[in-house]
Image (cartoon, grey):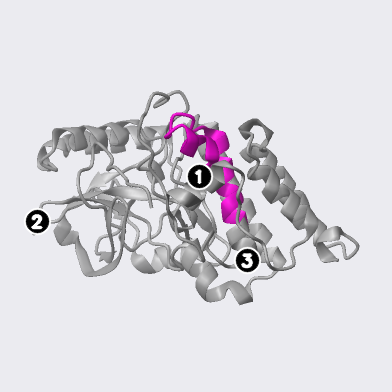
Amino acid sequence: MYPYHRADFLPNHTITVLLSGCCYTVAPKTLIIIFVRFKKEFDDWTSGNHDIDQLIQQTQLSAMLVQDLIEWIPFSKFANLKYLAKGGFGTVFKAVWIDGYIKGLNRMKNEWKRQSQTDIENQHKNGGNFAIKIYGVTKNPKDGNYMIVMEYAKKGSLLRLLDSKYNELDWDSKIANLYYIAAGLNTIHEAKLVHKDFHSSNIVNKNRFSPYITDFGLCKPVSQDQNSKELFGVLPYIAPEALHTSGKEYTQKSDIYSFGIIMSEVFTGFPPYHDIPHDQDLAFRICLGYRPKIRCKIPQILLDLMNKCLDTEPQKRPTARELIDILNHFFNDLKNEETELCK
């Protein structure tokens, strides 16, 4: 594994907190009232960090949907804190948010309407915008670490799902998962961003058919970091051009290469290069064209698509938008017993 760096505005650890988000639209007049309420409360809280305060306040005054709001959440509002895992940017926990997130303003009572845990579990069973919801920021008083409060993905990472449920996944579910992952990546790319740390541990599932992309600590605008001399990420997923140039040539096409590696993982159920060391020798071999071995029977048209994503020449790889269209076509073809996917 290559080294990571931390996001600039949030030092130290991150946190994943139990609860899911729903999409609520409100009338412009109501939004203005909500903005005024938020502004009145600015003096009632502080994170202890000016930049974080500014970030939260700006989102509260500019959000056009309630789901886009983030807030400062006192640590005392969480219960049943449980350690889950440690990643490149910090430690991940699970907890219950006692109050729940804001879903509107009760003008009669002059108080926030908040979503209960039960309502959330019942209402948010289907996908959203393919990126995991961020609710706000908190701070652990014991160690002083700031924590990002995020939506909880009950099924864990794609890596974990493939490890525990691979034999239960048919081609419908494999292609559907890849479609939604491609859709999430397309959302990132349409925003003129590059993820730069795209791998199966950074894709989480709320159920078996709802993958969400997470961990945007390395995510940058397309035009930024072209002069970077540092290389970050998980070696098996890093594109050869990024390895060869120490990260200088990391583009959206490099994310597509990572998607190709994820495809091999979904097809086989094994992490890439699971049987060899992840070292400089592997990096050198990747630059020379070495790719994960596929030792199980895969429809040729899926192998062809995977290999296009893994092409040594970045410009020969498809775009995320093209991946969506191709995978959607493949999924619809599964209904036809004469298609190559069913042979």
Separation (CA) of disc 1 from disc 3: 24 Å
User: Would residue 36 be visible to someone looking at this image?
Assistant: no
Magenta-highlighted residues: 239-263
Residue sitting at 34 percent across and 42 percent down?
A: 69
Nearer-the-camera pick, 232 or 290: 290
What is the quadrant of residue 90 in the picture?
bottom left
Dot 2 or dot 3: first in sequence order is: 2
Q: Residues within 10 Å of mark 2 (few under 14, many from 20)?
A: few
Residue where numbered disc 1 is placed: 284
Dots 1, 3 in contact, CB < 8 A: no
Amino acid marked by disc 2: Pro
- Vertical side of 174 occupied by 247: above or below: above
Residue sitting at 35 percent across and 59 percent down?
A: 115
Separation (CA) of disc 2 from disc 3: 44 Å
Q: Position of residue 300 (x, y in %)?
A: 79, 56
Q: Main secondary structure of the magenta part?
A: helix
- Vertical side of 290 occupied by 341: above or below: below
Q: Position of residue 220 (x, y in %)?
A: 41, 33
Dots 2, 3 in contact, CB < 8 A: no
Dots 2, 1 in contact, CB < 8 A: no
Nearer-the-camera pick, 64 or 233: 233
Q: Position of residue 275 (x, y in %)?
A: 52, 66
Amino acid marked by disc 3: Thr
Residue where numbered disc 3 is placed: 268
Does the magenta-highlighted stretch encompass residue 69? no
Amino acid marked by disc 1: Phe
Q: Is residue 328 left or right of residue 226?
A: right
User: Would residue 291 be visible to someone looking at this image?
Assistant: yes
User: Residue 141 — which label?
Assistant: 2
Which type of secondary structure does the marked residue at label 3 adopt?
Answer: helix
Residue sitting at 63 percent across and 66 percent down?
A: 268
Which type of secondary structure does the marked residue at label 1 adopt?
Answer: helix
